[in-house]
Amino acid sequence: MTPHLDSFFKQVDGLSESFIDRLRKAVAIPSISAQDEHRNDVVRMAQFLAAELKNLGAEVELRPLGKQPGKEHLDLPPVIIARYGNDTSKRTILVYGHYDVQPALKDDGWASDPFELTIDEKGRMYGRGSTDDKGPVLGWLNVIEAHQKAGVELPVNLLCCFEGMEEYGSEGLDEFIQAESKAFFKDADAVCISDNYWLGTKKPCLTYGLRGCNYYSVSVSGPGQDLHSGVFGGSAHEPMTDLVAILSKLVDSQGNILIPGIMDLVAPATEEERALYSGISYTVNNLHESLGSETGIHSTKEKILMARWRYPSLSIHGIEGAFSAPGAKTVIPAKAIGKFSIRTVPNMESEDVNRLVFNHIKAEFAKLDTKNKLDVWLQHDGKWWVANPKHWNFNAASKAVRQVFGVDPDMTREGGR
Amino acid sequence: MTPHLDSFFKQVDGLSESFIDRLRKAVAIPSISAQDEHRNDVVRMAQFLAAELKNLGAEVELRPLGKQPGKEHLDLPPVIIARYGNDTSKRTILVYGHYDVQPALKDDGWASDPFELTIDEKGRMYGRGSTDDKGPVLGWLNVIEAHQKAGVELPVNLLCCFEGMEEYGSEGLDEFIQAESKAFFKDADAVCISDNYWLGTKKPCLTYGLRGCNYYSVSVSGPGQDLHSGVFGGSAHEPMTDLVAILSKLVDSQGNILIPGIMDLVAPATEEERALYSGISYTVNNLHESLGSETGIHSTKEKILMARWRYPSLSIHGIEGAFSAPGAKTVIPAKAIGKFSIRTVPNMESEDVNRLVFNHIKAEFAKLDTKNKLDVWLQHDGKWWVANPKHWNFNAASKAVRQVFGVDPDMTREGGR
């Protein structure tokens, strides 16, 4: 099927020890972005990656992102941008990955030193960042190297964007991407993010969508200060009573959102889309395993996955300002703030969702006939994303998965970050 | 009206400077029961009080209460028990008070040093404990002293019970009272507690009742661990959704308890009882002042006071286990525990209340058709108390108030401790 790639695959096999050695070096650098004392290691990791890319002939730049917000004594680690290939007759793929890792200690339950790549008898490799995300990032370097050694030309131009703050909120990256959108990134024909997980353990997946998130606060306030329930219980409108009433009108126990109009915003599922679900490697048991219980709402794979990926959901996260410690406290909180979020999907526009949420809550609050005061606001929103899973970029990736793994990949969306 | 007391009142006036000086000494001892480092000061305060009582001729004992539970390196401060008078032809009154205080720092907003009695130009005295409860305790000593110096016999025998842990839950006192009920306390014909506030600022009050408190926890659990709302929102039964639904079925915004049968337990208000309310010095404005807002439910003095004193109320205090900090967190809590309490009144027996609460919550939970798990339990209960406001002890106190203040006292209950 792809005879011109035979020499490439031979190189991949022949180079596997050196690929593993490259990963070993990367894992050994504790590039923990969340810990100030490891900032130099994060920078060291950037320099290691940049040097490897240069060795392979890429044009590489380390771009500074300025000081870390809130920690102005620290420089943010640089973004590595690199270009490999300049052939205007080829497509240009922008690949994203990150070279920082989360903290890890042997005491956290690791069977081996997290910063030493360890290979077990089945050939499985353990080491902080080997999956998330040093391994996938190095995959791009390995691909370039194997093409070079096989004498096979890379069929695309590559642009790389590797950052060092992903595990700490990708500080500074948004501004950088905005600024470079018409500059370094302008040639990109498609984007490939190599920072994701398989749905199960058997098949690779290609992700073509992500739910968005509108996060809300609703506050009810009344008394000038917290009150004692012995003294004021029964004679004051209690903010918690009103807040609980409001929160109970948002979603039912079956996960149905009770806000009128929300479901009308949702794009209907097409037959073509439905057809994608049946082949996906997932079972109700997979859900129960990840829940750690059998408290799932739906009884078929399709319903579970559609609930997770392509329908909105509403979760109540908690209440700020009320008694939240163990034990007993007879307080009437003067002000309580409920937090909830709606996972958004195509075609829910944030402003439409906000308007429906605000109107519904205000209408329900009015029914309570309370003298307390209501406030409801959006804390933040993040837009949903969905791509066409038949796009040439996904087709190419599917072919590659079939070639290497012998199976079609699961075409997945994600429920939310 | 009471000519035989003229010499007594003269002594009270003449001794006022020395009474104030006694209070000054007491306030200067920082007998803070909540702070380990002040435990010696609490004991010092006990010794000061005991010495003053002995000087007046009382039989005094300092009774140890053992180690402080949970802080076994600390001895609880002693209970002071004292007897003044042994005349079997007289009634014997047991007086209770406490000699410990809450913490106080100038930084908390005090205009003067909290542990130095300070008198302003209007003669008002400021100092930690001057009202709660060193002043009232010393009042009993002052009464004895003024009788002695006036050569007027005290008309009753006095038993004293002064404790040093009231501001920290009266640790150890219950057991002590139980143990002494048939011993030191056996002669008591009536009890007088000198640790209370006036309802307003114009009239003393005599308190003849107190609401009880049944404090409940209701927990809903399901998943084996906290979940991410992006991944599981829409496909898992969420404990917070179910808990909020349950909590919304307990009480409405007008303060009406929604648990069937609860109001049937409440003793009906008699005409005699209703008659007590109209004369009480209280206004809707008083409520608004103490609320710090105009969010009261009722619009007449009688309704407000009856809601506070003689009808039950239900308050939702908060939720344990859910997100309670400022900001946004997209967690689905695996288990959330709601806390609420019911203020109980005659004739609500705790077991009856519990049964109605448990049945109602279980029935409402069953309606939700959720796979999550419910648990509801009583954290603790404290029984309501009500006395006959026409009892001779209240009549005597009323006469005394009329004598000294020229007004009838407000006959009050309290909403709860």
Image (tube, coloured by chain):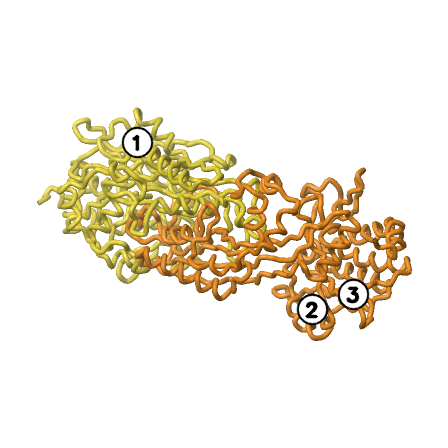
Chain colours: A yellow, B orange
Q: Observer-nearest residue: B274 or B155? A: B274
Considering the numbered disc 2 on the image, is that residue within a helix, a strand or a loop? loop
B175 to the left or right of B139: left
Question: Tag 1, which chain?
Answer: A
Rendered location of residue B224, percent (x, y): 36, 59
Residue bearing mark 1: A59
Residue bearing mark 2: B65
Rendered location of residue A270, percent (x, y): 15, 40
Rendered location of residue A231, percent (x, y): 58, 50
Instruction: Classify B90 as above or below B219.
Output: below
Query: In this rendering, do the residues under marks 2 and 3 share a single chain?
Result: yes
Question: Tag 3, which chain?
Answer: B
Query: Would you say residue A396 is visible in this rendering?
Result: no
Considering the numbered disc 1 on the image, is that residue within a helix, a strand or a loop? strand
Category of crowding for the residue at label 1, using alpha-carbon neighbours closer than 10 angstroms: few (below 14), some (14–19), many (at least 20): some
Query: In this rendering, do the residues under marks 3 and 1 share a single chain?
Result: no
Residue bearing mark 3: B158
- Taking the view exactly as shown, the residue that stands out farthest to the top is A182
Q: Observer-nearest residue: B223 or A371? A: A371
The label nearer to you, 3 versus 1, is 3
Tag 2: amino acid: Leu
Q: CA distance from mark 1 to mark 2?
A: 80 Å
Question: Tag 2, which chain?
Answer: B
